[in-house]
Amino acid sequence: MATLSIPNPVPSAIEDAEKLRKAFQGWGTDEKAMIAVLAHRDAAQRKQIKIAYEEQYKEKLLKRIESEISGHFERAVYRWIFDPVERQAIMANIAIKNKVVDFPVIIEIACINSSNELLSVKQVYQSLYKHSMEEDVASHATGDFRKLLFALVGTYRYDGEEINTELAKTEAKILNDAITKGEYNSDEIIRILSTRSKAQLQATFNCYKDAHNLSITKALSTKTPNDFVIALRAAIRCRTTPTKYFEKVLRNILQKSGMDEDALTRVIVMHAEKDLKEIKELFQTRANMTLEQAVAKKTSGDYENFLLALIGN
Amino acid sequence: MATDEQLALTRALSGDGGLGVEESTLVSIIGKWRKKPEHISSFRKSFNRLFSITGHIEKCEDDHMQKLVMEFSRFHQITVLWAMHPHERDARWANQVIHKNHPSSILVEIASTRSAEDLLGARRAYQTLFHHSLEEDVAYQVKDSKSKLLVGLVSAYRYEGQKVDNDVAKSEAKALHNALKTAGANKIIEIDEVVRILSTRSKSHLKAVFKYYKELHGKYLEEDLSGDALLQQTVLCLDSPASYFSQVINSAFKEGANHAETEGLSRVMVSRSDVDMEEIKEAYAKLYGAKLADVISKKTRGYFRDSLLSLAGEAKA
């Protein structure tokens, strides 16, 4: 469930556009007013506000925002304003064009969406960037990452519930063979992980666990951190237990030293209108504090206020 | 002395020298020989491909009967294919490649000549019919060197716009040439760069790549790919599908064409009739110096012939 809270009744798009305009005018920016509007509107409403603002004031809302605010707060608001499909297309492009492809972003987008949701993202990607997401992933990623990311992004997976138990047992064995040989980049691992349906994959992992008394993600833990294995584990968890995956990502960001604002922004912004509630609840049981408390501890200022507004304050 | 009708009946039932059967001839002879069993009896005695004297009867030969079934059913098959949703057609053909060992070239054909939306539609239809994705079945069942290319091609959801970055196209033409030159003992069809470029780039981009390849290296990419028929076919399908389809049609008419080749004729005529049949007719005339309609009229018979002509947008011969 979403954590996004929208007032009832919700003001018209024109009223909201006016409020934003007032927030921009004069010296400095009234960030609180910005947050009060933008962080409490759904995708359709945000789109209407963009249109109303542009019609009324003859300038693009996004351009104005970019000139009014900066830093982590600006990046978060920018990503938030778009609807989920366009947002993911934009974030995928940013991740791909990074000096080194930001693989967690691609993996998340490719693995947590249904086949048709991912297809929508790819369609918007094509209209924005005049390339297919697949060709950009393939031409920017290299080596094993290219194999994995391309397969995850490119497959239009079957979403049905049927399970073939014999096949699950066979493929659990194939996975085991590759893992025990340390061949983490094996074509078979990539094939199974990227082409099988969610139900079939879950059945395969269950067979694996039954046969070896070890979950597949634990089996893939290596002593030395290996980026590719990290990517495999992320893909496995995104495909089978996404809530747990995102909870862990948040806990890692918020409870370890250092701070990755981009990752924090990504998780909050991408899930606030989707399933942040479940992620939040799981976080609370495992971190012994609420997500709000954890975010407040590690962030500050307008950035903190914006995130807290999305989380459900 | 064989009568005219015996000759016509022989021709109609011999399954030789033409695809399909001449239904109207058969119907008329059936009418003419009514109440004259001596005619059909004399025909059975003379037509020993289908009948052999066994005991007191001229028994039907099983082998030839099978052949006849095939020829009679060409019209049936093409009609059903024609009526089917194009995506279901493609999905069923793809499934036959995977599960009935039909040639991989059919998979390459479908993946490379359909538009991005139609290939996606075929994949959706495949899921509806077979409860698996096409990608997972190809990846699972094809375990030889073709696997990378086939999985790449069927997974494609290409950008369909005209925009091309010429610098990238040039550098990819060079990259292809390099990859082929330095392949050594490795199979070209497994080279990552080759598969990446052919299976992800837009068709406009690829046409530019192929153009630069010839400009920079003096030879067409297909020439340098002569060691691998499937790769050659891929390039031809992407660059000039009308030429490719003309070749498939022509193979069906050659002496000793096998089952897969003759089926190719029906497949191409049905699947392209509404898409690029005019371009195919043009390409066919250029390649073989003959009008497609004329060759169809000569080499096929009966309702099968007539349906092919209709699909080609031509009046009956």
Image (cartoon, coloured by chain):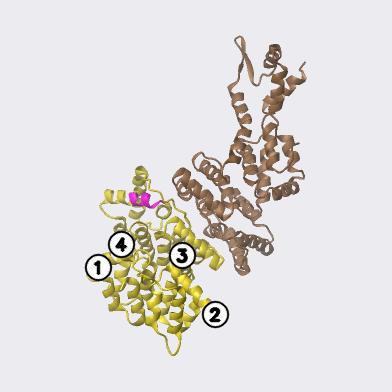
Chain colours: A yellow, B brown
* Pointers 1 and 3 in contact (C-beta within 8 Å): no
Q: In this view, does B186 lie to the left or right of B236?
A: left
Q: Can residue B279 be seen in this view?
A: yes
Question: Who's the residue at 33% across and 76% down the image?
Answer: A259
Q: Which amino acid does label 3 sit on?
A: Val
Kindly state the secondary structure of the residue where label 4 is placed.
Answer: helix
Q: Is residue B248 left or right of residue A172?
A: right
* Pointers 1 and 2 in contact (C-beta within 8 Å): no
Q: What residue type is labelled 2?
A: Lys
Q: Name the residue under label 4.
A: A244
Asked if labels 4 and 3 share a chain, the reply is: yes
- Residue B30 occupies quadrant: top right
Read off the magenta span: A196-204
Structural distance between the alpha carbons of marks 3 and 2 = 26 Å
Instruction: Report crowding for label 3: few under 14, some 14 to 19, many 20 or more residues within 10 A (C-alpha).
Output: some
Q: Which chain carries label 2?
A: A
Mark closest to the chain's N terminus, 1 or 2: 2
Which mark's residue is nearer the viewer, 4 or 1? 1
Q: Mark 3 points at which residue?
A: A85
Structural distance between the alpha carbons of marks 4 and 3 = 22 Å
Q: Is residue A179 left or right of residue B145?
A: left
Structural distance between the alpha carbons of marks 2 and 4 = 44 Å
Structural distance between the alpha carbons of marks 1 and 3 = 28 Å
Horizontal and vertical percent position of residue B73: 61, 31
Asked if labels 2 and 4 share a chain, the reply is: yes
Up the image or down, A38 lies above or below B259; here it is below
Q: Main secondary structure of the magenta part?
A: helix
Question: Who's the residue at 64% across and 46% down the image?
Answer: B272
Q: Mark 2 points at which residue?
A: A58
* Pointers 4 and 3 in contact (C-beta within 8 Å): no
Q: Which of A55 and B51 is in front in this view?
A: A55
Which quarter of the image is occupied by the N terminus of chain A? Answer: bottom left
